[in-house]
Image: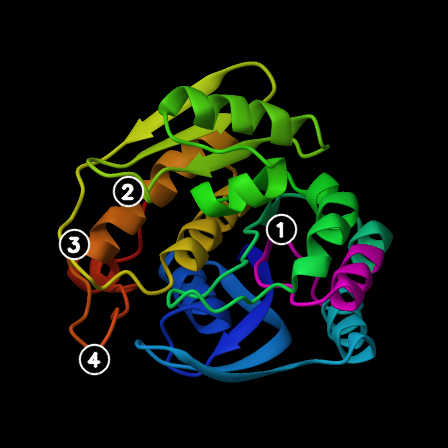
Amino acid sequence: MKRVLTIAGSDCSGGAGIQADIKTMSAHGVYAMSVIVSVVAENTVHVLKKQDIAPEIVRAQVDAIYEDIGTDAVKIGMLPTPEVMSAVAEKLRKYCPKNVVVDPVMYAKDGTALMAPQSIETFKAEILPLADVLTPNIPEAEEITGMHIETEDDMCAAAKLIYTMGCKAVLVKGGHFAGDPIDILFDGEQHISFTANRIQTKNTHGTGCTLSSAIASNLALGYAPAEAVKRAKDYMTCAIEHALELGHGAGPTNHFYSLYQSGLPK
């Protein structure tokens, strides 16, 4: 069985963060493991409080995984402080995992900042260059590049600029645009567009976490980056189409819908 590690924050409501990652990985038939970097008290409506984990505990969690089980892919999500980023980067440089997918989580669905503003430069210097695939949405791509992104051409330019910062491929997600969403993957040689029909639902809690975890799972299963992204987007679309009416705000997607309907994804 392929092994996939998520390094991220915990969402007690189960729709995002570590919980969404583990659900997504399990739905793909891979063995999910976790390193928790922050405990976030949140639900479908808002973030109440969070408590970041001490860097030495983050380091110890990573060591625990690699001294025993190892990985075939790693998904990195919320990294709240420069100190936590440095701890994660130190361990990734030590263990040199393959198939590292980085979702630069900066804001919760309600707009609460999950990455300290002073962390952006540390992220760009220490975490971004370790990514095999980086998956920023439009606001995150704007934070990373300093660009204002309004068009598909802007997305392509942002992806190319982010690529020059050291990652191997960039997927700029266009879900924040009006109309049908389009995502742009740049691998250093070509731009590949992925389009889908917009699903009219408020229940999109944890979609970024879910998509990046699905990409990591598909990379672990042996798919090339473009195919891994395509399969992950197909999985994400199904999960949103059958999202769960839970809570009073942006509800969670249905991570196990395809599993319940027809067995493990092939």
Residue 234 numbered tag:
2
From the viewer's perspective, is the residue at label 2 or at label 1 nearer?
2
**Against 23, is 186 above or below?**
above
- Residue at 52 percent of width and 76 percent of height: 10
Sequence order check, earlier mark of 3 and 1 = 1
Q: Determine contact: label 3, label 2, CB under 8 Å.
A: no
For this view, does 71 lie left or right of residue 94? left
| Towards the viewer: 106 or 243 | 106
* Residue position marked by numbered label 4 in the rendering: 248
- Residue at 52 percent of width and 22 percent of height: 157
Sequence order check, earlier mark of 1 and 4 = 1
From the viewer's perspective, is the residue at label 3 or at label 4 nearer?
4
Residue segment shown in magenta = 69-90
- Residue at 46 percent of width and 36 percent of height: 172
Question: Which amino acid type is marked by label 2?
Answer: Asp
Circle 3 packing at 10 Å, graded few (<14), some (14-19), many (20+), is some
* Residue position marked by numbered label 1 in the rendering: 72
- In the rendered image, residue 199 lying in the magenta stretch gets the answer no
Image coords of residue 177 (percent x, y): 30, 39
Question: Which amino acid type is marked by label 4?
Answer: His
From the viewer's perspective, is the residue at label 3 or at label 2 nearer?
3
From the viewer's perspective, is the residue at label 1 or at label 4 nearer?
4
**Alpha carbon separation for disc pair 1 and 4:** 37 Å
Q: Is residue 29 visible?
A: no
